[in-house]
Image (cartoon, rainbow, N blue to C red):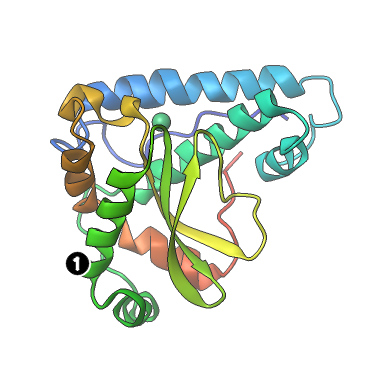
């Protein structure tokens, strides 16, 4: 099947000033679209054509770097759009108690996310995930993803590529992280936690 560029789950102005409509027009309309198009082109007429995006990522990991990068980036961006929300959302009681246990408080978690995101070298992603029953902050480099990794359930992700923030915050990644921290979709994270299995890209 061919994969579709999923719609943004909010208006393109909804995340301003953390993430502007102009950034989203390029990031969603150009970057994400290009990853989807390249994935579709690479799988057309191959054994991968009928697979889910998660299956394509798993099959390409370690064997086809080009397809891996494009399919993983397609998934990561879909997950990232949902990781932010226009309105303030709140964590479920289950998620709240895990955050308190593992990070002290929501503010403590946000600080750690910002610290790890700011310290990440070059392109990549910073994730909130569940591993071994505990919340953990993970980093992946370039297009790498948690989508196909066993034993880890991603709850939220923040894009650390410059294309995510350069138009709005120039080189100030910490300013972007602080702003995006205020837009995180705790209700999406709670759904991912409650499901207990990794989110699936809607085809
Ligand atoms: Fe991106």
**Is 72 left, or right, of 21 in this rendering?**
right
Residue 66 sits in which quadrant?
A: top right
Who's the residue at 60% across and 27% down the image?
Answer: 70
Q: Judge: label 1 CB < 8 Å from ligand 1.
A: no
Task: Work out whether residue 107 or residue 7 is closer to the camera in this orientation and state it.
Answer: 107
| Residue 184 visible at all | no
Foreground: 100 or 11?
100
13 sits to left or right of 55? left
Please tell me in which quadrant of the rendered image residue 152 appears: bottom right
47 or 146: nearer the viewer: 146
Q: Position of residue 64 (x, y in %)?
A: 74, 28
- Quadrant of res 122: top left
Q: Is residue 80 above or below residue 23?
A: below
Q: How many marks?
A: 1
Quadrant where the C terminus sits is top right
Return the x and y of residue 53 as percentages of the image width and height.
Answer: 66, 39
The picture quadrant for ligand 1 comes to top left
Indicate the secondary structure of the residue bearing disc 1. Answer: helix
Q: For mark 1, what is the residue?
A: 107
**Residue 30 rendering spot, x and y as whole percentages:** 42, 17
The structure residue drawn at horizontal position 39% and vertical position 47%, both measured from the top left corner, is 82
- Camera sees residue 155: yes
Q: Where does residue 172 sit, x and y in percent of width and height?
A: 18, 33
Q: Residue furthest left?
A: 17
For the N terminus, the quadrant is: top right
Q: Which residue does the image show at 20% across and 42% down from the upper left? A: 174
Q: Is residue 38 above or below residue 79?
A: above
Q: Residue at x 20, y 58 (%)?
A: 88
Q: Label 1 neighbourhood size at 10 Å, few (<14), some (14-19), many (20+)?
A: few
């Amino acid at each position: 099947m061919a994969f579709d560029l999923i719609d943004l789950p909010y208006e393109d102005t909804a995340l301003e000033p953390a993430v502007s409509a102009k950034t989203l027009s390029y990031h969603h309309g150009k970057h994400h679209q290009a990853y989807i198009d390249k994935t579709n082109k690479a799988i057309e007429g191959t054994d991968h054509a009928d697979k889910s995006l998660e299956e394509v990522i798993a099959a390409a990991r370690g064997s086809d770097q080009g397809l891996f990068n494009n399919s993983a980036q397609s998934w990561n961006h879909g997950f990232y759009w949902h990781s932010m929300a226009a309105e303030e959302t709140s964590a479920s009681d289950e998620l709240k108690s895990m955050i308190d246990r593992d990070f002290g408080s929501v503010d403590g978690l946000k600080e750690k996310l910002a610290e790890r995101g700011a310290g990440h070298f070059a392109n990549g992603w910073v994730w909130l995930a569940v591993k071994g029953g505990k919340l953990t902050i993970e980093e992946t480099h370039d297009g790498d993803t948690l989508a196909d990794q066993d034993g880890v359930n991603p709850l939220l992700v923040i894009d650390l590529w410059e294309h995510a923030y350069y138009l709005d915050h120039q080189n100030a990644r910490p300013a972007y992280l602080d702003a995006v921290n205020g837009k995180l979709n705790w209700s999406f994270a709670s759904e991912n936690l409650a499901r207990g299995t990794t989110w699936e890209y809607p085809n």
